[in-house]
Amino acid sequence: MPKDHGIGASQKRREDVRFLTGRGRYTDDINLPGQAYVAFVRSQVAHGILKGVDTSAAEASPGVLRVFTGKDFEGVGGLPCGWQVTDRFGQPMQEPAHPVLAQGKVRHVGEIIAAVVAETYEQARDAAEKVVPDIEELPAVVDMRAALADDAPKVHDDLKNNLCYDWGFVEENREAVDEAIRNAPHVTTLELVNNRLVPNAMEPRVAIGDYNPGTDESTLYTTSQNPHVIRLLMGAFVLGIPEHKLRVVAPDVGGGFGSKIFHYAEEAFCTFAARQLKRPVKWTAQRWESFMSDAHGRDHVTKIELALDKEGNFLAVRTETLANLGAYLSTFAPSVPTWLHGTLMAGNYKTPLIYVNVKAVFTNTVPVDAYRGAGRPEATYQLERVIDKAARELGMDPIEIRRKNFITEFPYQTPVALVYDTGNYHCTMDKLIEIADLDGFEARRKASEEKGLLRGLGVNCYIEACGIAPSNLVGQLGARAGLYESATVRVNATGGVVVMTGAHSHGQGHETTFPQVIAEMIGIDESMVEIVHGDTANTPMGMGTYGSRSIAVGGAAMVRAAEKVIAKATKIAAHLMEAAPEDIELKGGEFIVKGTDKRIAWGDVCLAAYVPHNYPLEELEPGLEETAFYDPANFTFPAGAYACEVEVDPETGKVTIDRFAAADDFGNVINPMIVDGQVHGGLGQGIGQALLEGCVYDENGQLLTGSYMDYAMPRASNLPFFTVDHSCKTPCTHNPLGVKGCGEAGAIGSPPAVVNAVIDALHRAGHTHVTHIDMPLTPARVWQAIHG
Amino acid sequence: MYEFEFARPTSLAEALAALKAEDAQPLAGGQTLIPTLKQRLASPSVLVSLSAIEELKGVRREGDTLCIGAATTHAEVAREAAAHYPALAALAGGIGDPAVRNRGTIGGSLANNDPAACYPAAVLASGATVVTNAREIAADDFFQGLFTTALEEGEIITEVRFPIPQAANYQKFEQPASLFALVGVFVARFADGVRVAVTGASEEGVYRWESAEEALSKEFRPDALMGLRMNPANMIHDIHGTKEYRAHLVGVLTRRAVAAARG
């Protein structure tokens, strides 16, 4: 019998009752009395000198309260960057100013030039059309290689060039890696592009600024994954509002995938304008604004070399990447191509020598930052693609070459800083072979052949570093933030529990899974536990949700706080039953004196805490509420093996995914159904990247994929039935739940499986000249590769 | 959107009168016009909805001709034409998604003449007649390039008359993002010959592939197309496909359409 309560139960998501019946409360559902609306005037050119902005006609337009330009923000801070990377020469990265509204120059299509606030949104938009920017257009830099040329136009005139940093990792290994590759019996080289993506959360971004002149308090309602981070960044660095006068609320949020981590100009603007106008100011993004203002993802151009001996043992890996950062440094942008990417280059393998070089480049495009997986998909993709190519060159089976190189002893110190605490890569590979029915592949291939279709099989592994992260470690790596998590567990007088967590749910199901943990610990029903998140006014300072960290870090903080609560309640129970605390156990919602029939219910103890008539007041304070901050000792390392089977139509190049199997090791699992769903969603996004999605700019910096007419999102019909399994469990050794995180795995592990499968299909059909096709593998590209 | 007046006449005569206003524009299913208005790329003074005019709706058969009212939705055509002209019904059932098919109309699609729309291929390959409030226009005269038709200002399509072929098939290869036709080929075989119309591919909009028609009229088999190549010179080139790819797809889809039409 599967469990129906506590840890391990596939409980239905309680939040879905409101989401599926239209009772969610998203930021756009909030409307404040006296609210005004802003329409932003966004640059239509990618690069130019902003000589002036004529706002006179807009100011005279009906309903307009005020028109703001960059001049209004001259005394205001810029948007801060939360991570400083040091280059391989020991110098800090080049860090340009990032104004809220454009000042002096525009640097990408979509940058805000002016903001029109009016009584209604339509009036604001009418007036915005009357704002006339005076822009002297400059040549745009879009291509990264061109941006690094000596004579390239500079995105930021006050910087030396368009190179943000030239990062080497591990720099001390550089020569040893070069030598290993020079002397290796076999070197496989692959050049590839990790395609630029537009995040496309279902809910576009929204911000409402509010100000109370009576109390001098500001409130920002925003679509954020981390309201406390926004409060700190915006309050301290942009607007100079102390945190006790600033509240940030992120209510129900409809998907983030990373794009709602960052502090955006629109948030600062609405908060600022509300203080100026003493009225609430609301902005709701149009979808076209999302395309040109949400931070994009990926966009790496990479050359990877894998050195092997004749038996297929990996000797060394060397990679060189150009990473596009866009026109400005988004909040965590510098960390993505470096610490979230280079440190993963060992993968699941005991490669002894690794060197990673990343040149991060400014271009006249939308800023690029973390997107589901953030750096880890880029690492996994290049490594798992080059391994496949190497296996083919050496005539080895792609599964065997991986098995031969698996790390099998833990803890394992990689040559790229990380220490994997635990794992079992043969277990997930064995499980994959079973659930994907790889033995039946040949029969399926023949059936496809009879239909004139080419069937291919792609297999790969992945590892990710999640549960970010130990604060002291990331501090050394340049993070300007700690990455602990917090929780307050408040027990009410009648025994109900409210958990106030610094983590934030925007699709992950925390309101269901977090109560399962509390229910397991205390032995009460989940219905007695409520989760509160998303409001800095009633949650402890927390770092929010990204990097698959909620249960591993936020859940751990909750466990620590609950342990404190239980310890105190045990003392109260001991007093009430006249026993020693060490003789008492909490089981099934009751405190029991071991070896006796003396017992007292959880609710009675809670009541005693708040009605302390018979209570050890000399030893204990009344009340039952505890807070914990949890800072992890290490990252967690989810890992797995994925298999994709495709059918390629050789006449049209069209790729159909027939089946996809994922065998993951997430350590312990709180709610298997929710974990399945997280994997399904990740696979959908990974397959979207592999087959469909690609953000394209033309040479002038115009966004060619600015709507769903040209930017292909995955649809249900593009996806196969997924077979997923997470029965291989090597629990994390350093957090109290033994959990690792599952939110990004699917998006990290699936792109190489798809591409490996297509290349396999073409090779089996004799198209052996095709060694690689860049994502997205559109029909046109696959056809071109076959016939090119 | 910008502000506009909205009229919803119940007869063709009222609609024609309403369209005489300066900058008035007819609104059929709105599947192109409404998004255009939302993006503020059009600013009509009056939108004249054709959705309440019963005389413009419905599918009826007259001998060997299938007559479809201009305001008939794609979903209705998919349902009502299936027994009479299955290839046409299948085409209608493959446009967009259910929401599009329940709003979009055949008249709206033809008047807009999007170069990647499906209906123009069926109309041209069938040799259909486009009937307006003023006249009857042969399909060969109706389509005049991207988003351009023979319609005059204020002229409304009332009906489309399709001669029912002996055999027909439509093959659409979808553009991955929009699901419009990257290339679509409609093949229709009549007693007096075969007609082949191609949508999605050409910079000049829907067109007939005459050399294929000639070959297939002699011998209605996929092999009859062997050796025929579409010239890529006038094909569309964009991020979804090159000229050469589109020209290649025209050949592939035509062969597949012939094979499917033969059953």
Image (spheres, coloured by chain):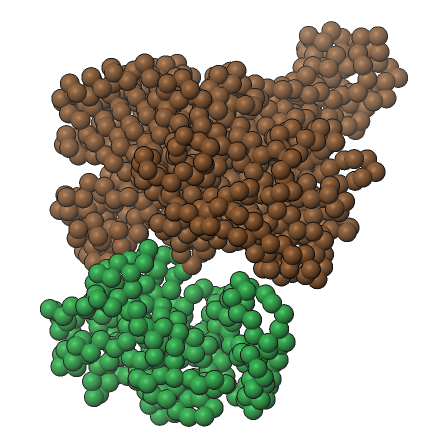
Chain colours: A brown, B green
Q: Position of residue A682 (x, y in %)?
A: 44, 40
Q: Of A702 and B14, which appears nearest the observer?
A: A702
Q: Is residue A242 left or right of residue B67?
A: right
Residue A329 versus residue A357 in the image, above or below = below
Q: Position of residue A785 (x, y in %)?
A: 21, 49
Q: Is residue A323 visible?
A: yes
Q: Residue, x 76% and y 8% (percent of image)? A: A579
Q: Residue, x 46% and y 50% (percent of image)? A: A136
The answer to which image quadrant residue A709 occupies is: bottom left
Residue A337 versus residue B150 in the image, above or below = above
Q: Of B68 and B19, which appears nearest the observer?
A: B19
Q: Residue, x 40% and y 60% (percent of image)? A: B178
Q: Position of residue A260 (x, y in %)?
A: 55, 39
The answer to which image quadrant residue A670 occupies is: top right
Q: Residue, x 62% and y 61% (percent of image)? A: A126
Q: Is residue B113 left or right of residue A192?
A: right
Q: Of B13 and A670, which appears nearest the observer?
A: B13
Residue A182 versus residue A150 in the image, above or below = above
Residue extending farthest to the right is: A613
Q: Is residue A741 visible?
A: no
